[in-house]
Amino acid sequence: MKPNGYPWGVFLILLIAAVFGVMASFPFVFSLYADMLARAPIPLPAVFGLALVQNTVILGVIIGVGLLLTTKLGLPGPSLIEDWRSHKPIGDKLRALIPLAVMTGLGVGIAVLLMLVLLLRKELPQLPIGKAVLIPIWRRLLICFYGGLTEEILMRVFLFSLLAWLLNKLSRTRERPPKRKVIGVANILLAILFGLGHLASVVPFMPITLKIVLGALLLNGVASIAFTSLYLKRGLEAAMLSHFVADFVIWVIGPMFIAR
């Protein structure tokens, strides 16, 4: 954060990115939940318009609080954006993060697909990833921006910093950045929340059994821990790129193999 005030420029960039991610998800959401949306009591454009306004307000609050906590705790935050805004060279940082972020994303994406096939083979046709087989590839590509932008801002900038701040308070320390133990516990708690959060997309299609809950925790938990670790090492932008690549493997490439 700037020493003389709040980083409104960074806030605006992150808000635009997060809202763009929400808008990019609409075509995929329309295909996945077409039957339910057709029964909506208001016209479909109004549904998406209200969703966009609601998400923009919520994301604005989340990003605002997240940037404050990130700075307070001395966490990486959007380091490339901050350097660019401060007219610092970012070429070396960018070249260093891209290979690691891409390789991490590929590894996470492949691992998640393998676990889906091995652990949830019978449930695959009812899961969103199974239904994505019938969704046009361009819509599956767009949903990757939601994970790479919106989810990363929500998870890393806001929720991770909030968990770390709360744990720091409970441990009665003021270290910047927090102790490794605090960071580790926050990482695990975030992974659990990330996994549970994805259950909402499954509810309309099938009963939530213990197997589905454990699967969501494992698959999404592995991804969350990997992205948070990358975030702590290389900053938010590295986690964004890695999440996008992982989602590309899962949502764009994955359904092609599942359909066989």
Image (spheres, rainbow, N blue to C red):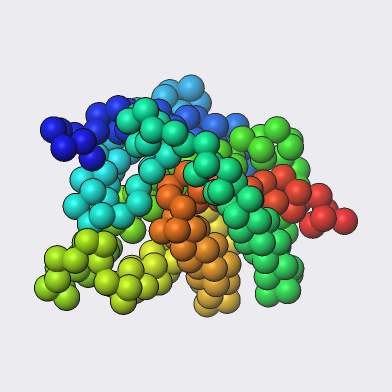
Tell which of 4 and 27 is nearer to you. 4
Residue at image x 21%, y 36%? 2
Which quadrant: the N terminus?
A: top left
Is residue 145 found left or right of 64 in the rendered image? right
Q: How many marks can you see?
A: 0
Residue at image x 46%, y 53%? 234
Dividing the picture into quadrants, the one containing residue 136 is top right
Is residue 185 in view from this perspective?
yes
Residue at image x 13%, y 33%? 4
Does residue 172 sit above or below 48 in this rendering?
A: below
The residue most toward the right is: 260
Tell which of 243 and 132 is nearer to you. 243
**Residue 220 x, y percent position in the rendering:** 53, 63
Is residue 205 in view from this perspective?
no
Tell which of 114 and 1 is nearer to you. 1
Does residue 142 sit above or below 192 in this rendering?
A: above
Does residue 174 sit above or below 242 in this rendering?
A: below
Is residue 219 found left or right of 181 in the rendered image? right
Residue at image x 50%, y 44%? 93
**Residue 86 x, y percent position in the rendering:** 32, 30
**Residue 159 x, y percent position in the rendering:** 32, 55
Which quadrant: the C terminus?
A: bottom right
Dividing the picture into quadrants, the one containing residue 46 is top left
**Residue 27 x, y percent position in the rendering:** 60, 32
Is residue 80 found left or right of 30 in the rendered image? left
Does residue 170 sit above or below 18 in this rendering?
A: below
Is residue 223 found left or right of 119 in the rendered image? left
